Image (cartoon, rainbow, N blue to C red):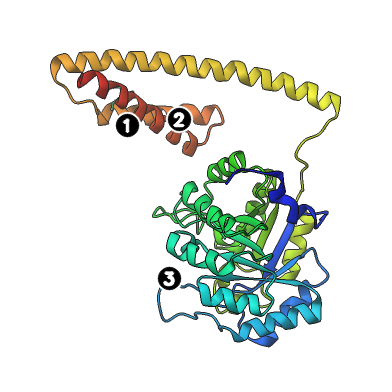
Amino acid sequence: MENSTQLRNWLDDMALAHPLVIAGPCSAETEDQVLKIAHELKDTDVNYFRAGIWKPRTRPGNFEGVGAIGLKWLQKVQQETGLKTATEVANRAHVELALEHGVDLLWIGARSTVSPFIVQEIADALQGTDRIVLVKNPVNPDLSLWLGAVERLHSAGIKRLGVIHRGFSTYEKTKYRNIPEWQLAIELQTRFPDLPLINDPSHISGRRDLIFDVSQTALDLNFDGLMIETHTDPDNAWSDAAQQVTPRRLVQIMKDLRIRKETDQEAEYNNKLNNLRAQIDVIDNQLIEILGRRMKIADAIGGLKKQRNVAVLQTSRWNEILGKMILEGEGHGLSEEFVLKMFKAIHQESINHQEKIINA
Ligand SMILES: O=C(O)C(=O)C[C@]1(C(=O)O)C=C[C@@H](O)C=C1
């Protein structure tokens, strides 16, 4: 699959004055609940009403969705509010039922995207559909797996495609439920600049107080839309209670978000920008040159260690460097996270250099 401006036709055709908004409860619970939320979202920026019908849960025994009856409630949403509808599909039977019930947008969840077998089954069932199909990132940060799923749908003749960034599972304790790894979304945009990219701040955050900031970051990174879980009584939701917001809060979020344009033609802005970029170019070249010099010294250390048969990894020296550099970084406005990442990469490169020398 190649990038093509046609990939964004379905989104451009909507001619929206704001990012695409998909909102609604994590799960459809009852007909009343679905319709109540939909009516509250009717005259807002919301374009698609979402509700989970089949819920993939981490452990059995939790609420696993109301099943096919919920699709009838989504039809009522269309009739009563004029909102288009969206739901997750995870196998052929889900696809067939969703298509039969006129669901306008279908998405493949993170736990399905990891399995090429499941994705292929869904692609085959969707063959040639004109519905919009979005692919959530796989739970692990694997861009090829994510794009591979999109490719399977593309090969099945599905033209109205897009992706949803919902963050990635991690063993580490962080403030997020699923860490965003924004670099991956940036790389995806570099490879497929025209593939519509939606952010799911609800699953990244896992808690409602982070949703605004995650959404703003997404818009600052040129995302095309947001999928935000919305419930009239979030605390008593049957699934994902902590991360859902009320329709009122959603409206406020949309009002407060600053929507940025991709670029600006104004002369003075461009002059200043070019000047600053020229400064960055000079510094980037210096960085590369200086890192090259550091590696030459590492090579010399490798030579010394070879003579004396000493191990490459020197943990205490390494910890000493890290501690010093974190403090140094702080003084220059650099976060600990960044300094750690950067020095881990430098250390690894240094080890690779020495490995070559010591084993030559
Ligand atoms: O000081 C050393 O012994 C090195 O090999 C250099 C260096 C580094 O790049 O700073 C690399 C590997 C060691 O684990 C510690 C530090």
Instruction: For marks 1 and 2, give the CA distance.
Output: 13 Å
**Residue at left offset 69%, top offset 48%:** 219
Instruction: Please give the residue where the numbered disc 1 appears in the rendered image.
Output: 319
Q: Residue at x 47, y 37 (%)?
A: 336
Tag 2: residue type?
Leu
Along the viewing direction, whichever of 140 and 159 lies nearer the viewer: 159
Looking at the image, is mark 3 or mark 1 nearer the viewer?
A: 3
Q: Amino acid at mark 3?
A: Thr
Estimate the x, y position of residue 153 in percent, counting from the top left: 57, 58
Sequence-wise, the earlier of marks 3 and 2 is 3
* 121 sits to left or right of 154: left
Q: On the image, numbered disc 2 is attached to which residue?
A: 327
User: Mark 2 and mark 3 in contact (Cβ < 8 Å)?
Assistant: no
Residue that carries the numbered disc 3 in the rendered image: 58
Q: Quadrant of residue 282?
A: top right
Q: Is residue 61 visible?
A: yes
